[in-house]
């Protein structure tokens, strides 16, 4: 097979922003020659050319014609596009040119972290990355799956990897949705070493899928000396997945949540998806039940109409009523609506406080039966009230020292 002499990566065109197009042509003589076209050449041209030279030296490119068409790309994007193009020419080169790690991103997560909202960002669209955390989602998902076209999936890996290193997530949980297996296993090599918190596993239909992902993560962690906890969020998106939901949810102690995805699920049923959701009610309840039985969070699907705020609010209220604890977001404007709708109401908080205080009083007096007014309160009701209090505190609606 003849050696490839020319390759490219990135995007170009009038509508492109915060991205670039890099083309590398290997030559036999002449050294490294670079050409830059950029609207910000006068301000950043020197630093862009310096990065091109640095990366050429890093990958030991001796002779090449390198052209860059820049549309306001940040350095981590330019580096990702350059490396992606280069690796098409020399796929056997395992060296990685990594951006400097943003020290603001060195925080960890927890299995029971609040996950009301998770904002999906397409893995091949760097323009969405820098400001996503400013909208205060509980989690940010860099997506390598459905939002990335088949021809761009390899290139997107470098972009997502560099974003994990360089982009400020502003405290949001750092998530990546990998591709379906087996391709998704190769995705993991790019993201596991860079303080990812949660891996979303799409179209999950068996516990074996969880085991394969977990085994690959363990191997990479051992090879790269990764110490942080990495949790898993399988997504149920088919009739078979619904049937096996509990098997999946209980497959690993690293599973933090079970999510449902309804676009693929309704396609699998051969029916249209509606905002009312009658066609998916059984599946959503089954996912909630499986998650609760396994002791993990239940996360609802996205609401796809970004202009229908009332519809979104109603969807979240219904999701909350059947046991979901979070929802996917595809636009930043959805986040506040989701957070507010999932939070306990004032009446729910007041009622929960009365139940918890009555329970505490009964325990203090050695009374085995808890009463609130004329009503007897049993253990499940107390547990639910305690959970409401916890949510109120997490949502900033109640001081954690409220009993004082």
Image (cartoon, rainbow, N blue to C red):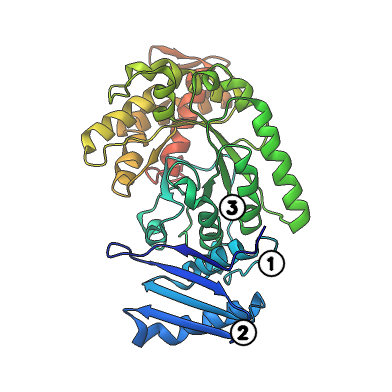
Name the side, left or right, on which 220 lies relative to 307: right
Residue situated in front as seen by the camera: 376 or 39:
39
- List x then y, in percent, for residue 298: 49, 30
**To which quarter of the image does residue 158 belong?**
bottom right
Q: Residues within 10 Å of mark 2 (few under 14, many from 20)?
A: few
Figure check: 329 above or below 225: above
The numbered mark at residue 95 is: 1
Quarter assignment of residue 3: bottom right
Q: Position of residue 51 (x, y in %)?
A: 53, 80
- Of the 4 image quadrants, the one containing the N terminus is bottom right
> Is residue 143 something one can see in this rendering?
no
Mark 2 or 1 closer to N-term?
2
Residue indicated by mark 2: 29
Cα separation, mark 3 vs mark 1, equals: 20 Å
Relative to 111, 221 lies left or right: right
Q: Viewer-proximal residue, 394 or 98?
A: 98
Secondary element at image label 1: loop
- The x and y percentages for residue 179 are 55, 41
Q: Residue at x 44, y 55 (%)?
A: 124
Mark with earlier residue (2, 3): 2
Which residue is rendered at x = 61% and y = 37% of the image?
Answer: 181
- Disc on the earlier residue, 3 or 1: 1
SS for dot 3: loop
Q: Say few, some or many: other residues with alpha carbon within 10 Å of mark 1 (under 14 / 14 to 19 / 20 or more).
A: few
Question: For the residues carrying marks 3 and 1, which lies nearer the camera in this image?
Answer: 1
Q: Nearer the viewer, residue 177 or 370?
A: 177
377 or 240: which is nearer to us? 240
Q: Is any atom of residue 67 visible in this view?
A: yes
Mark seen at residue 196 = 3
- In this rendering, the label closer to the viewer, 2 or 1: 2
Q: Give the residue displayed 44% in from the left and 63% down from the top.
A: 10
Give percent across and percent down for residue 56. Answer: 60, 78
């Amino acid at each position: 097979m003849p050696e490839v002499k020319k390759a490219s990566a990135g995007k170009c065109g009038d509508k492109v922003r915060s991205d670039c197009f890099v083309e590398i042509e290997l030559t036999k003589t002449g050294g490294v020659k670079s050409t830059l076209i950029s609207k910000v050449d006068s301000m950043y041209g020197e630093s862009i050319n310096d990065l091109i030279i640095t990366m050429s030296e890093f990958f030991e490119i001796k002779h090449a014609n390198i052209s860059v068409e820049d549309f306001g790309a940040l350095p981590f994007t330019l580096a990702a596009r350059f490396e992606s193009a280069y690796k098409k020419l020399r796929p056997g080169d395992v060296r990685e040119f990594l951006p400097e790690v943003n020290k603001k991103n060195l925080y960890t997560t927890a299995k029971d972290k609040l996950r009301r909202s998770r904002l999906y960002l397409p893995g091949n669209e760097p323009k969405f990355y820098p400001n996503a955390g400013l909208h205060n989602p509980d989690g940010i998902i860099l997506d390598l799956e459905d939002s990335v076209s088949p021809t761009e999936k390899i290139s997107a890996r470098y972009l997502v990897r560099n974003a994990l290193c360089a982009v400020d997530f502003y405290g949001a949980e750092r998530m990546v949705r990998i591709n379906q297996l087996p391709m998704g296993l190769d995705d993991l090599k790019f993201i596991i070493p860079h303080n990812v918190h949660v891996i979303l596993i799409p179209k999950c239909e068996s516990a074996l899928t969880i085991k394969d992902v977990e085994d690959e993560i363990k191997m990479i962690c051992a090879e790269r000396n990764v110490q942080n906890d990495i949790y898993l969020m399988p997504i149920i998106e088919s009739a078979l997945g619904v049937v096996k939901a509990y098997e999946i949810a209980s497959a690993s102690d690293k599973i933090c949540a079970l999510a449902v995805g309804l676009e693929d699920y309704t396609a699998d049923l051969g029916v249209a998806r509606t905002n009312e959701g009658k066609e998916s009610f059984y599946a959503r309840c089954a996912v909630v039940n499986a998650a609760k039985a396994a002791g993990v969070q239940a996360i609802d699907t996205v609401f796809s109409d970004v202009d229908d705020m009332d519809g979104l609010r109603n969807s979240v209220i219904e999701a909350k009523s059947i046991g979901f604890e979070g929802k996917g977001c595809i636009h930043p404007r959805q986040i506040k609506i989701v957070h507010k709708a999932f939070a306990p109401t004032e009446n729910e908080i007041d009622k929960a406080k009365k139940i918890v205080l009555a329970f505490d009083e009964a325990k203090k007096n050695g009374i085995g039966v808890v009463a609130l007014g004329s009503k007897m309160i049993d253990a499940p009701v107390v547990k639910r009230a305690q959970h409401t209090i916890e949510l109120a505190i997490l949502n900033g609606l109640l001081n954690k020292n409220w009993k004082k």
